[in-house]
Amino acid sequence: MSDEQFASVWDAIENTTEEAENMKLRSGLMMALKAHIARTGLSQSQAAKLFGVTQPCV
């Protein structure tokens, strides 16, 4: 086991700094969308229509 420490889980599991940064941004966006859906009380189907994706994607 290594004693190496990382700033985030993405830094630990991604191969490059760029990939890690991309995943940090994507996860932040997903958390913001989840909070918006919860705050506004949208159903999955309503959220899917609003975001222009299929319900399983939500």
Image (spheres, grey):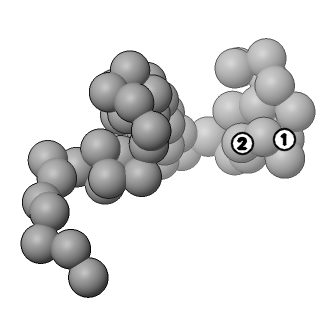
Would you call the spot at circle 1 few (<14 residues within 10 Å), some (14-19), or many (20 or more)? some
In this orientation, does residue 25 appear?
Answer: no
Would you call the spot at circle 2 few (<14 residues within 10 Å), some (14-19), or many (20 or more)? some
Amino acid carrying mark 1 in the image = Gln
Give the side of residue 53 with respect to residue 17, left or right.
Answer: right
**Extreme residue in the front direction:** 2
Q: Residue at x 22, y 49 (%)?
A: 8
Q: Which mark is residue 58?
A: 2
Toward the viewer: 28 or 47? 28
Looking at the rendering, which quadrant does residue 39 occupy? top left
Give the side of residue 57 with respect to residue 8, left or right.
Answer: right
- Per the image, the residue denoted by label 1 is 55
**Image quadrant occupied by the N terminus:** bottom left
Determine whether the residue tagged by mark 1 lies in a helix, strand or loop: helix
Rendered view: 53 above or below 8? above
Q: Are marks 2 and 1 in contact (CB under 8 Å)?
A: yes
Give the side of residue 57 with respect to residue 36, left or right.
Answer: right
Amino acid carrying mark 2 in the image = Val
- The x, y position of residue 25, in whole percent, is 38, 26
Q: Residue at x 14, y 47 (%)?
A: 7
**Extreme residue in the bottom direction:** 1
